[in-house]
Image: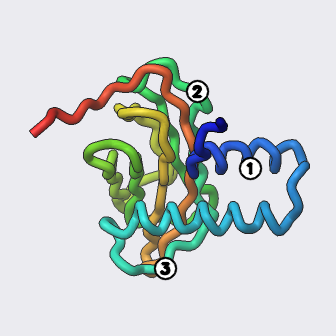
């Protein structure tokens, strides 16, 4: 008897095979579309129904974090254009909106390094809202070996 395959396991296997070059471009494209859907769903409470465009935002998270109590995360944008705000969403946390950063007129760079408290292995989504209202986003997966957030039972 084989164990049932869940969506997370399937996506992890597809990512590994894509990185190894074993999947066709069509499968890689389907995975990218799925990633865009995850970003749109995660950012809907923050940006409503604004279209989310992938790209422009750089997100640095460790692939594996030993302790979810303090995971260093960096988010930024290259180029001269300064966003109005940047947000990070931890999709599996009890309170998904992890941080919101607003940039003032004297900000030199659109770059922030902070530490997040993560409940378990999950996808981190970072987005930047530009002065013209467009929203650019990216995401990254992080594996947590020891979670931090616990939701108390009701």
Query: The N terminus is located in which quarter?
Result: top right
Judging by the rendered image, the residue that carries numbered circle 2 is: 64
Label 3: which secondary element: loop
137 or 95: nearer the viewer: 95
Asked whether, in this view, residue 113 is left or right of residue 95, the answer is right
Residue at 63% in and 61% down: 79
Which numbered disc flags the more N-terminal residue, 2 or 1? 1
Classify mark 1: helix, strand or loop: helix
Q: Is residue 42 above or below residue 118?
A: below
Between discs 1 and 3, the one toward the N terminus: 1
Query: Which residue is disc 1 drawn over?
Result: 14
Q: Is residue 7 above or below residue 27?
A: above
Residues at discs 2 and 1 in contact (Cβ within 8 Å)? no
Residue 112 at what x, y percent from top left?
Answer: 46, 43
**Sequence-earlier tag: 3 or 2:** 3
Rate crowding at label 2 as few (under 14), some (14 to 19) or many (20 or more) other CA atoms within 10 Å. some
Q: Find residue 39 and report its horizontal and vertical position in percent.
A: 50, 62
Residue of label 3? 51
Colour style of the rendered protein structure: rainbow
């Amino acid at each position: 008897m084989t164990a049932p395959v869940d969506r997370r396991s399937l996506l992890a296997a597809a990512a590994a095979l894509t990185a190894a070059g074993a999947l066709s471009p069509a499968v890689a494209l389907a995975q990218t579309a799925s990633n865009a859907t995850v970003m749109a769903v995660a950012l809907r409470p923050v940006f409503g129904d604004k279209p989310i465009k992938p790209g422009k935002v750089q997100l640095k998270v460790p692939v594996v974090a030993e302790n979810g109590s303090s995971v260093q995360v960096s988010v930024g944008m290259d180029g001269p254009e300064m966003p109005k705000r940047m947000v990070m969403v931890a999709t599996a946390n009890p309170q998904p909106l992890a941080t919101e950063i607003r940039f003032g007129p004297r900000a030199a760079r659109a770059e922030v390094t902070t530490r997040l408290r993560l409940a378990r292995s999950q996808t981190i989504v970072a987005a930047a809202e530009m002065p013209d209202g467009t929203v650019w986003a990216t995401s990254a997966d992080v594996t947590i070996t020891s979670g931090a957030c616990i939701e108390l039972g009701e």
